[in-house]
Amino acid sequence: MVERVSGAAGPAAGCGPVPEADGVRALYERYVIPTYARMGVVLTHGTGSHVFDERGRRYLDLGGGIAVNALGHAHPALVSAIEQQARRLIHCSNYYYSEPQGRLARELVRLIGPGKVFFCNSGAEANEGLFKLARRFGHSEGRFEILTALQSFHGRTLAGISATGQEKVKQGFDPLVPGFRHVPFNDLGALEKAISPATVAVLIEGIQGEGGVNPARPEYLMGLRRLCEERRLLLLMDEVQCGCFRTGRFASWQRILEGAPGGEGFLPDGVALAKSLGGGFPIGAFWVREPYADLLGPGSHGTTFGGTPLACAAALAVLEVIEKEDWAGHARRLGDRLLMELGRQVERHPRVWAGVRGMGMMIGLQLQPEPAGLTGAGQSPAVRLTQLLLEEGLLVIPAGTHVIRLLPPLNLSEAEAREGIEILERVVGRLD
Ligand SMILES: *Cc1c(COP(=O)(O)O)cnc(C)c1O
């Protein structure tokens, strides 16, 4: 039963079935630091690809908690894994061994390639670990600089915003962490020119997420691999959003490089994971390729909560369900279908949409520079449309000012996909 929340000033009163939205909002206004521009609704529970607000209104969740709820809400296997592990051992310090962490590391190595894994709690932390790996790698030669892409996103810690190739996340936080420079994405020549004697690593997303769903081109990935080899740079990939089977393969490069000459042998030197890894339970990780896997030795890195038995049991359950029931294959097939249908919608409404792109359950809908019915209003067109869709019962995630992202559960059903397309069509048709 949900606790009833009466208002900002008083204590939570009584035990009614429903929190009042105004009361919850008042609590946030009074007590929660206002870093997020929140949508109006108060969510109370979810099941599968749907969530419910305090009035019992149902929403189709195609945002997936920003690519987190890989199996939707309240998946019985995930709930049961968490429940059973919670009874046994929720947390133990990393001074000790626990079986789930060892098993999860083995699974990730099987899915990525020969190497080892460190566990943390978020995507930003996973990237932090890769930054420290790169610093260690180049330390004796005085190399420390990491090249990242324009329009990238790598998290909100101080090093994360320093690595991120978007001005808006940096404003007001300088001096930033030194040693990051940004280059145009998918431009091998520009990257090669940017390499300095201090450069030690390159970090890119396989598919830029916050930047608007921009996949790396196969030639770019293959070129980067060769260039990094030649110049002795670590090739680091931020798979926080696009990894964990989102594209239909475990890692985005595995999907992007299908059919590319030499693509099957491609491996980065470090990989950051989080978001979908725990299916909603917070967990992050970074994988390091074999020759570098012991660079971070005892005492060089750590975190209290990283790789708790509970988090690892959750992640193991998510991986097991995805693989046993082939939700990756499903995500790929349904993603292809969605791209086709959305492509037709883009053609029907050229005054609103400019295009659609993506892979599997990671799809970006590009708005026109001045999309019909979405200009003015003091909000970006993407946020405005996100709000209109929410009012019609559909949750999506904006990226920047002009892209709408669909990052739904991998086990989204065909009927749910259709429902989403219909809501989009209704709302966009009205704007056009
Ligand atoms: C979300 C995201 C991060 C940050 O992850 P957090 O868990 O929010 O710290 C980093 N990189 C990419 C590509 C992301 O999408």
Image (cartoon, rainbow, N blue to C red):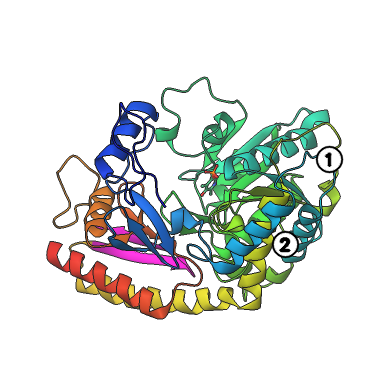
Q: Please name the amino acid that badge 1 sits on.
A: Leu
Q: Quadrant of the C terminus?
A: bottom left
Q: Is residue 380 left or right of residue 60?
A: left
Q: Residue 266: which quarter of the image? A: bottom right
Position of residue 366 measured from the top left corner of the image (x, y, whole percent): 32, 59
Q: Secondary structure at mark 2?
A: helix
User: Which one is in front, 76 or 137?
Assistant: 76
Q: Please name the amino acid that badge 2 sits on.
A: Ile
- The correct choice, above or below, for 78 with respect to 145 in the image is below
Q: Is mark 2 within 8 Å of ligand 1?
A: no
Can residue 224 be seen at all in this image of the molecule?
Answer: yes
Q: Residue 340: which quarter of the image? A: bottom left
- The correct choice, above or below, for 33 with respect to 203 in the image is above
Alpha-carbon distance for marks 2 and 1?
19 Å
User: Which one is in front, 184 or 430?
Assistant: 430
Q: Main secondary structure of the magenta part?
A: strand
- The residue sitting at 70% across, 47% down in the picture is 90
The residue indicated by pointer 2 is: 112
Work out whether mark 2 precedes mark 1 in sequence or the reverse, and give the earlier one: 2
Q: Which residues are magenta?
A: 353-368
- The residue sitting at 48% across, 66% down in the picture is 409
Q: Is residue 333 left or right of residue 341?
A: right
The residue indicated by pointer 1 is: 295
Q: Is residue 357 magenta?
A: yes
Q: Secondary structure at mark 1?
A: loop
Q: Is mark 1 within 8 Å of ligand 1?
A: no
